[in-house]
Image (cartoon, grey):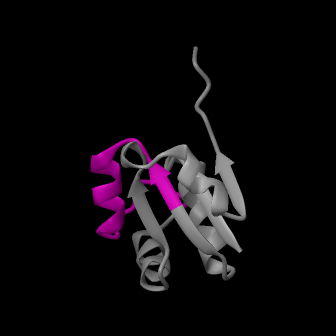
């Protein structure tokens, strides 16, 4: 199944990584291009996801993308889309 996770922070990154680990085609999107660059280099900043674990799923074909360059309509073909939004205080 295709799984898209919008937001690659402390909730989204572990979700995307786990989806890839259990065999789904995972795509993680984020609006921060620096975050995507860091993650695609295999460098995790999330405590629950070791960099070695992130590199392992990237090696299987999991993708991380800068969401600013994508239209929401392009996500319609995916099986599952998960979005986590940080509460605004």
* Image coordinates for residue 29, horizontal then vertical, percent: 48, 53
- In this view, the residue farthest toward the top is 89
Q: Position of residue 5 (x, y in %)?
A: 59, 55
- Magenta stretch contains residue 34: yes
Q: Position of residue 84 (x, y in %)?
A: 63, 41
- The N terminus lies in which quarter of the figure? bottom right
Going 58% across and 14% down the picture, which residue do you hit? 89
In percent of the image, x 65 and y 55: which residue is there?
76
Picture quadrant of residue 79: bottom right
Relative side of 27 to 31, left or right: right
Magenta stretch contains residue 47: yes
Residue that appears at 30% across and 48% down: 33
Please tell me which residue lies in front, 29 or 43. Answer: 29
Q: Residue shown at 59%/60% (left/top)?
A: 14
Instruction: Locate residue 75 relative to residue 56 in the image: left or right.
Output: right
* Residue 43 showing in the rendered view: no
Whether residue 36 appears in this view of the structure is: yes
Residue 77 is situated, as x and y percent measured from the top left of the image, at 65, 62
Instruction: State the image quarter where residue 2 is shown.
Output: bottom right
Q: Nearer the viewer, residue 74 or 82?
A: 74
* 12 over 53 or under it: above or below: above
- Magenta span: 28-48
């Amino acid at each position: 199944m295709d799984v898209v996770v919008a937001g690659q922070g402390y909730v989204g990154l572990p979700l995307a990584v786990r989806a890839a680990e259990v065999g789904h085609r995972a795509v993680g999107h984020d609006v921060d291009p620096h975050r995507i660059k860091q993650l695609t280099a295999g460098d995790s900043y999330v405590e629950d996801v070791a960099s070695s674990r992130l590199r392992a799923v990237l090696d299987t074909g999991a993708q991380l993308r800068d969401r600013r360059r994508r239209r929401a309509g392009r996500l319609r073909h995916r099986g599952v889309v998960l979005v986590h939004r940080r509460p605004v205080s």
